[in-house]
Image: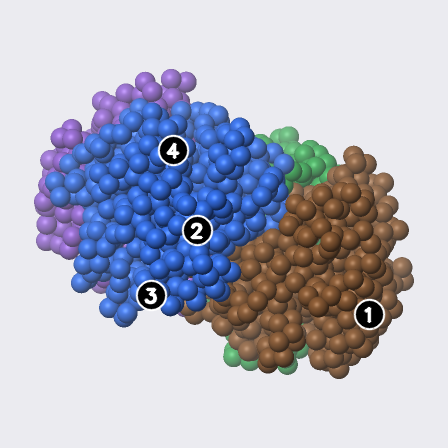
Chain colours: A brown, B green, C blue, D purple
Amino acid sequence: MSAPNSRRLIAGMVGGGAGADVGKSHRYAMRLDDQYELQAGVFGRDALASRDIAAGLGVPQERSYTDYREMASAEAAREDGVDVVTVATPNDSHFEIARTFLEAGISVVCEKPLTQDSETAAELVRIATANDVVLAVPHCYPSYAMVRQAARMVRNGELGAVRFVDVEHASGWAATPLEELGHKQAKWRTNPDIAGFPSVVGDLGTHALHLLRAITGLEAERLSGRLQTLVPGRRVFDHATVELELTGSVPARVWASMAATGHNHGLRIRVYGEKGSLEWRHEDPHHLKVQDLAGATTVLSQGLSTLHHDASRLTRVGLGHPEGFLEAFANFYSDLAEVLRARRDGTAMPERELSFPTGIDGLIGVQFVEAVAASHYDDSAWKVPASFAPSRVEKAAV
Amino acid sequence: MSAPNSRRLIAGMVGGGAGADVGKSHRYAMRLDDQYELQAGVFGRDALASRDIAAGLGVPQERSYTDYREMASAEAAREDGVDVVTVATPNDSHFEIARTFLEAGISVVCEKPLTQDSETAAELVRIATANDVVLAVPHCYPSYAMVRQAARMVRNGELGAVRFVDVEHASGWAATPLEELGHKQAKWRTNPDIAGFPSVVGDLGTHALHLLRAITGLEAERLSGRLQTLVPGRRVFDHATVELELTGSVPARVWASMAATGHNHGLRIRVYGEKGSLEWRHEDPHHLKVQDLAGATTVLSQGLSTLHHDASRLTRVGLGHPEGFLEAFANFYSDLAEVLRARRDGTAMPERELSFPTGIDGLIGVQFVEAVAASHYDDSAWKVPASFAPSRVEKAAV
Amino acid sequence: MSAPNSRRLIAGMVGGGAGADVGKSHRYAMRLDDQYELQAGVFGRDALASRDIAAGLGVPQERSYTDYREMASAEAAREDGVDVVTVATPNDSHFEIARTFLEAGISVVCEKPLTQDSETAAELVRIATANDVVLAVPHCYPSYAMVRQAARMVRNGELGAVRFVDVEHASGWAATPLEELGHKQAKWRTNPDIAGFPSVVGDLGTHALHLLRAITGLEAERLSGRLQTLVPGRRVFDHATVELELTGSVPARVWASMAATGHNHGLRIRVYGEKGSLEWRHEDPHHLKVQDLAGATTVLSQGLSTLHHDASRLTRVGLGHPEGFLEAFANFYSDLAEVLRARRDGTAMPERELSFPTGIDGLIGVQFVEAVAASHYDDSAWKVPASFAPSRVEKAAV
Amino acid sequence: MSAPNSRRLIAGMVGGGAGADVGKSHRYAMRLDDQYELQAGVFGRDALASRDIAAGLGVPQERSYTDYREMASAEAAREDGVDVVTVATPNDSHFEIARTFLEAGISVVCEKPLTQDSETAAELVRIATANDVVLAVPHCYPSYAMVRQAARMVRNGELGAVRFVDVEHASGWAATPLEELGHKQAKWRTNPDIAGFPSVVGDLGTHALHLLRAITGLEAERLSGRLQTLVPGRRVFDHATVELELTGSVPARVWASMAATGHNHGLRIRVYGEKGSLEWRHEDPHHLKVQDLAGATTVLSQGLSTLHHDASRLTRVGLGHPEGFLEAFANFYSDLAEVLRARRDGTAMPERELSFPTGIDGLIGVQFVEAVAASHYDDSAWKVPASFAPSRVEKAAV
């Protein structure tokens, strides 16, 4: 990672307070490469607690707000206002909060699923475009160096034409009815009012789909889905299997689960091409397996001198020194920083082909959730995700 | 493996001559535990070549036949006639050959897919029952010691109720158009007249389904299938993905492929229960992975003193001495030998719960192929495999 | 990781400027948990370049020094002077620089090998004690959560008495004569004047030994060593194998290499006890393999709820989210921060059993290098590393 | 494996009766490829029990002997006498039995360690040469296809000059004092009168050394050894670590243990060359890992079309169908059969570079045991194994 080439970006945060793992992850990620200063925020609904958290994080007292609307207008008014705000609240509040900042001309990193329906998601994309600000969505797995290596290999044609893709994000974290035992995250993720009925598709399936899209560059053209509740008594679906047809009729499968007993995080992708195949697993993220036509398997490590620039540019330490989730998340923020600085300083925009996901990606994720649910309720009939022309919008949105 | 407790069984073979890997595998498997003597056969359509092969295999000249019908009647007439005949010819001749021996009162091992349609497969089951002989089908993967361990664990409830099963038999052997280069096996397996259009389902998908059934004891109640031809120009389907609902609405998936670029044999199963999960891969067959609710993975090896009897009884050498495919195939023949000897000698029939597959299993395989094809041609609509009450027939057939 | 409980520590650095990976690693590690502010430093011998680096790192101009002596006296004189200085220069300057800061009453993190001979290393330990400051040595591998888990398991007797230990730090980074191609690090690490003849023992062997000591709590009582130069023409030894007798006559082996062709970083340890054994590999640091007497292997992952507190307290993100080298390095700095803050604020000193390595550990490393060399030049005769009673000094040094 | 090209060889056996795993393994191995008929033997000291075993194995009654001397003279006198006799008795009787058959002009397969001292081992080699018969020693691990692949790669220079070799045969089978619980094999293997004090070196260390020699073609020129008794109360050494200098001063290490807690069989070798390295593990014998200079690892599978002929000729079933220990052992017997048939039939002798081990290899193993013991009792001083010019004798002995 190159050192930051100029002064740090000013960041704000809404949500992500005490007990919220996701907020901590965002802060670790912002901090690692020293390109952001967290200077403003609302860290929860309780004003006093939020203020304490802000103080602990070194946020100046006058920029510790009690309301996101107040924060948006105050920061927009400052000469040294925030360059970007991270929205790390539960799903049902994403839309209103993100909209408020985007309309105030402030770039936003909004957790996924972007919103609860594709209409509001599309609305956010439009607002970002109209206000000429960045809307980024932290699907951070493609920011792993070895996923970028995979994406470059596929896009360079090193596997030949893609023939089949198999992705799974099958976690074991909720294989028991944790929500009945007072587990906080389990509670809201199994509450259909907050997480939606196809909760697992929004939470994990969208990561799987995005990973597939980021590596292959292919889009889901139609799909057939099945939703199940594996843990008896659970109020949402916790398991989904989806058959897909990608661009060019390439078949694919997605398995998303929060009840895959015994699994840890369980994210894995395999891509089969006419000349070779590859596999990447999140439990061993600094390696990439490549299989050739004869049947030999080669394991590439992060840091190898033979990797593509897209991978090596995301490598901080030497060969054999594993980097993990926080480094990948930091790569997301680092790619974002390049764009935010280019906009702030009026310098040349960086290459965007393999970079951070935007609102379009978030919208495609929400469309995916809706199509899976629609298929499920129609006895797994094939459905076409609401079409949205990504290419046209993407430029506008960044 | 206990030593054979009495004189050897007399075996015959139809097919499996020169260049036929499958015939060799059967012979290795019969030989390993010294429970069979190959004493009769037709080893190909060319009479002279067949006779040469017979001689090389130590088959007496007078029992080297030129026609399976002649063999059936001659052997049936001998005092010391064959106890069992292995049918290892291409798929389209299975029915006639197996029928002939069964009707002559001779037990049969018939390669899978048992026949080309479920009607003839059911017919074979009926004939075997009517003639009180054994019809066995060499789905030999469940004869691996560690698969038996898995089956016993699941059936003992060590994983709790089964919630999801994922199986794949995704080989890379025909990821290129081998059939155009004169590859013999590729030629008939991609010929729809011999292998059927859903070739890959009959060839590999039936192994995957049988492995699932053998471990879990669950049956496919309905399914939704998709067939693809991944290698351009190929005349049959070489890739299939199937969504299943098993007994008790348990979801499952099967992926069968002969075009999974870079894979070797590619057979793998994962079973998820309420208390744990397990994984077995054919590329590493002497280990079984078991995952607990907390997320720890324990690797069990063949030969461990802590394994169930169903696994340890199939173990020939000490801990850490891998056994492979031929040993598993020999286990199939060894389990079969126990039944054949009990029938021959009038002794007590062995425990049959975890043993070799019979004609019923072969029939269920053929029904599976038909249901997948039917679903595929109906835009992946859910189909119910032709129902056949296994429990009722199974007793009869052995 | 708990949030910092009070204001940040003030850090300084000597060395670690442009092109120095090690300096970057220290800064990533300090930054991740937000417990340090880098506020002073000398970042190289070229004054202008150093000043530029300082500016890029946000170090105030008046605290960007051109000489470490000047820095030591200026910082010691400030009310808000540095709490700790990291020495990240080549080996031959460690002693003078570290001594200067320690004598000025400033705590020091000094890269390993601590110094070039055990006399000067012991001198540093004495100076640190006399001045009542901390001398820490960044053997950061034991700061991985899963190494701490291993250490706690061994110390709790979960493996029973330790019977054998095998460690290797066998890297492939210099398997070719890189030094002839102008590779900077290879140049000084193969220069006997800077790195010493047994370069690989000082550079990698000391990490291996420290990892062994940190997990088992045992010390090397005597050893027999062999040094080789595997890459023809190289001026230092690049490969060493050492046989050890640990406390209680427990046998052990160390293999250190910078020429293990094909390896990446190559650090691995296996510990065998009377009731079980364990293995940890740096290429897969978030897992720990534990083998039981029967021969089953259980793989524990970082983040499992069943791990010991020593491991779980070092875990930042959820189960299945790998943490890597920088997180381990950050754990080193975080453990150090607890001690530095306790001293600064006069609060209770944290538990020190499984924490960061100190000057004593650095000294033991240097004694190890000397004993290996002595044995090598005496035809591998057994040698006793210079005795230094660790227990007595350790309390003093912290 | 090619089919046997002519009538079977006649085999005899001494020892290997009831409860003797090793006898069973020899019989499985002889049977698999159908090149041997077991037609004579003494299967234990109890005449009645031996006769029962013979009957169960199909050995004609008149060739079931009660004494090996009787067997040797009777078989030597027969027109159709045995072509080869396998000696599978405890170590202390090898010499007398093997000598008797060799002197009777009968080829011998003698278990390792060949004899209890190098003088008698050399004597056997001389007798075999003098009588122009084959003396083979079943170090069967190099008969694995992937070990042959490794040997061919090293000998072809694909790794460049060999720089370091690390072998371990560290089993966990006797990590507890089994011998006190009446475990039969443990009893004699821990009895110094039968197994010798350095029992583990004779039993497992010789396999490790032979594997090293078979792959690299290098010989041990001097060594330094350490013996330990890890299990308290045990009467022999159960753990040994040896430092070696091979031909050309190449360093190497051997670790042999029967008390490596948690291990299964524990045989593994790593070979480092100037251009690459490789690793083979007996727990996963159908794969071979190859690492290149850059640090990528390629996994080769048995059956790949890209393997050398030395590997592919030992492959019975298709790619992805694992072969195991019995297949490797059968390869040993198959290579031996080629030589025995060539001698019997007067046809051309097969290529012997990568084939079965002979008495020379057995002798070198015994010399290794003696040198390790000598070094151990001389405080690990370097010792030169008794020199025996292998090249000169090898031709003679086959």
Q: Amino acid at mark 1?
A: Glu
Q: CA distance from mark 1 to mark 4?
A: 57 Å
**Residue B355 occupies quadrant:** top right
| Chain at numbered mark 3 | C
Q: CA distance from mark 1 to mark 2?
A: 43 Å
Instruction: Pinpoint residue B192: horizontal percent, then vertical percent.
Output: 68, 74
Q: Amino acid at mark 3?
A: Asp
- Secondary-structure class at tag 1: helix
Q: Are marks 2 and 3 on the same chain?
A: yes
The residue pinned by badge 3 equals C46
The front one of D380 and B208 is D380
Classify 10 Å Cα crowding around label 1: few (below 14), some (14-19), many (20 and above): some
Q: Are marks 1 and 2 on the same chain?
A: no
Whether residue C380 sits left or right of residue A62 in the image: it is left
The residue pinned by badge 2 equals C12
Q: CA distance from mark 2 to mark 3?
A: 18 Å
The residue pinned by badge 4 equals C132
